[in-house]
């Protein structure tokens, strides 16, 4: 008879209790009435559209910034700019996201960016994108930088020997080798963006039909006592998240197979 380890005794029940059970609790409380009311609510579909559009641009901006960070990591690792960026990359992870939202509000609100509008950049879809970017960029940066670390530096040296400048060598040699990392960084950034609430509601606001996203829609419905609608919207979020995770896992397996066959 196989001996059960302490880790199995601890992990299995805690995993089901603390991870799987809450998800099942949401799915188990879905009602037909809640589904009908939610899916017939135009504000819900506005929140879905806002979430997908802003998360896409936040993830795209995260990847572009991460590529810039990886450039400094490869070509200028000893500079003060790289050292500051490397240190600050992890700050959004440790920083409370309400603080991040307030920081963005003070930085890009009407006091500093009043020329852009009566509220500056705050309480607009651009503000939602910036708030999502602030919390998702570290994931993209670490993903792409980790992949850049594995690149054979001799290939870059050969390109430099043949006359390529650092930007040219980065564009022609490095970026093509970062294809999977760029894709993974984008998906991770997108996933993190659609789940963000605190920074988004602090800086972007929660205006139904304008800046409201799925996370703030769920919060609003709970506040209004519309729990069945909040549950349906939450289940919709879970579905999107599961599709993203499955997509990322499938891409990873396909890449692993292509490497084995190469």
Image (cartoon, rainbow, N blue to C red):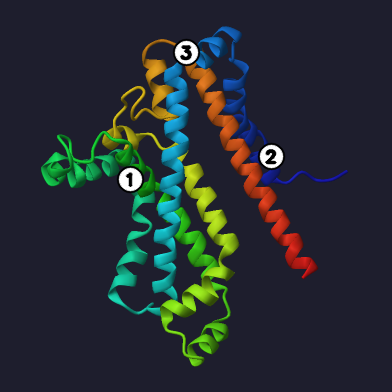
Q: Is residue 2 above or below residue 38?
A: below
Circle 1 is placed at which residue position?
Answer: 130
Q: Earlier in the sequence, mark 1 or mark 3?
A: 1
- Residue sitting at 62 percent across and 17 percent down? 28
Kindly report which numbered mark, 2 or 1, lies closer to the viewer in this rendering. 1
- Residue sitting at 44 percent across and 69 percent down? 70
Return the mark for residue 20: none
The image position of residue 113, as x and y in percent, is: 16, 45
Kindly report which numbered mark, 1 or 3, lies closer to the viewer in this rendering. 1
Are circles 1 and 3 on residues that touch, CB within 8 Å?
A: no
> Helix, strand or loop at disc 3?
helix
Q: Is residue 161 above or below residue 105?
A: below
Circle 3 is placed at which residue position?
Answer: 227
Are circles 2 and 1 on residues that touch, CB within 8 Å?
A: no
- Residue sitting at 56 percent across and 61 percent down? 181
Quadrant the C terminus occupies: bottom right
Kindly report which numbered mark, 3 or 2, lies closer to the viewer in this rendering. 3
Q: Earlier in the sequence, mark 3 or mark 2?
A: 2
**Mark pair 3, 2: CA separation:** 35 Å
> Helix, strand or loop at disc 1?
helix
Q: Is residue 243 above or below residue 223?
A: below
- Residue density around tag 2, few if under 14, some if 14–19, many if 20 or more, within 10 Å: few
- Left or right for 220, reference 260: left
**Mark pair 1, 3: CA separation:** 30 Å
Observer-nearest of 53 and 26: 53
The image position of residue 40, as x and y in percent, is: 51, 13
Q: Is residue 53 above or below residue 34?
A: below
> Helix, strand or loop at disc 2?
helix
Q: Earlier in the sequence, mark 2 or mark 1?
A: 2
Circle 2 is placed at which residue position?
Answer: 9
The image position of residue 39, as x and y in percent, is: 53, 16
């Amino acid at each position: 008879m196989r001996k059960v380890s302490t880790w199995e005794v601890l992990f299995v029940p805690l995993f089901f209790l603390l991870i799987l059970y809450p998800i099942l609790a949401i799915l188990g409380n879905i009602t037909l009435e809640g589904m009908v009311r939610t899916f017939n609510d135009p504000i819900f579909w506005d929140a879905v559209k806002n979430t997908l559009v802003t998360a896409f641009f936040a993830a795209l901006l995260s990847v572009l910034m991460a590529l810039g960070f990886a450039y400094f990591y490869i070509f200028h690792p000893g500079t003060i700019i790289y050292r500051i960026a490397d240190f600050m990359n992890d700050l959004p992870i440790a920083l409370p996201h309400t603080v991040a939202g307030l920081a963005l509000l003070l930085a890009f609100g009407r006091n500093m960016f009043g020329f852009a509008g009566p509220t500056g950049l705050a309480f607009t879809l651009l503000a939602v994108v910036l708030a999502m970017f602030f919390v998702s960029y570290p994931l993209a940066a670490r993903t792409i930088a980790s992949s850049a670390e594995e690149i054979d530096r001799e290939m870059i040296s050969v390109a430099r020997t043949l006359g390529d400048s650092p930007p040219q060598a980065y564009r022609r040699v490095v970026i093509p080798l970062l294809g999977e990392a760029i894709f993974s960084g984008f998906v991770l950034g997108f996933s993190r963006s659609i789940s963000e609430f605190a920074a988004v509601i602090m800086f972007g606001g929660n205006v139904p039909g304008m800046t409201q996203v799925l996370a703030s829609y769920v919060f609003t419905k709970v506040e209004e006592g519309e729990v069945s609608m909040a549950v349906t919207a939450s289940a919709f979020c879970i579905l999107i998240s599961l599709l993203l995770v499955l997509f990322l896992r499938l891409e990873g397996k396909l890449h692993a197979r292509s490497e084995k066959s190469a």
